[in-house]
Image (spheres, rainbow, N blue to C red):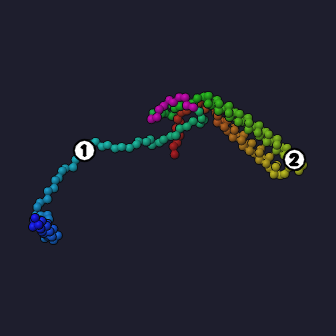
Amino acid sequence: MNTFKFSIISVVLAVAVSACGETNEPVIDVKAPLVVKTMPIESAQASATRLSGTIEAQQQTPLSFQIGGRIIERAVDAGDRVQAGQLLFALDERDLRQSQATARAQVQSATQALATAKDELARAKELARADFISDQALDQAQLRVTEAQARLESARQGWCKRITPWSTRSSLHQRPVS
């Protein structure tokens, strides 16, 4: 049995030693022809071209109302073609009337504030002549008149914006696009 083991071990060692040496034999036979498979190139779809993308208008016009309010009617949908002067949306007139009342109250309040500031300035001038108040107090009274005038002007502009006889219906008018 020992001889059998000895013979197997010697065969394994002989194979291992012979595998470690260099061989001069070529691995690939150079003389054997290479096989190359060729196929014609064809389009999956001969004449159809598919592209994906987004189409946008060359000119876009942002729209808005001159006054705030709730839209009660929409005459066109997104993507519809419109003509100049065509009705697009209509606003709830109750919002306009409420806005006008608010503007009227702001003008009245600003008018009263200006009258009060002018009266205080006249009193401050009399007191300044008698040296009962400083020049700084007189300047402050004058500043209050200037501020009241600016608030009144702002309120009047808001009033004019709200009472201008614009319709509560909006339409698109052509404007130059820069």
In contact (CB < 8 Å): disc 2 and disc 1: no
Which mark, by number, is residue 44?
Answer: 1
Q: Where is residue 157 in the image (x, y as percent from the top left)?
A: 67, 38
Neighbor class of circle 1 (other Cα within 10 Å; few <14, some 14-19, many 20+) is few
Q: Which residue shows up at 82% across the image and 41% down it?
A: 119
Q: Looking at the image, tell me whether mark 2 or mark 1 is earlier in sequence order.
A: 1
The residue stretch that appears in magenta: 70-79
Query: Which quarter of the picture shows residue 105?
Result: top right
Magenta span dominant secondary structure: loop
Q: Nearer the viewer, residue 64 or 36?
A: 36
Residue lying furthest front = 1
- Asked if residue 93 is positioned above or below residue 24 in the image, the reply reads above
Residue type at tag 2: Leu
Q: How far apart are marks 2 and 1 (CA)?
A: 98 Å
Could you tell whether 130 is left or right of 81 in the image? right
Which mark, by number, is residue 127?
Answer: 2
Query: Which quarter of the picture shows residue 81?
Result: top left
Q: Where is residue 144 in the image (x, y as percent from the top left)?
A: 77, 45
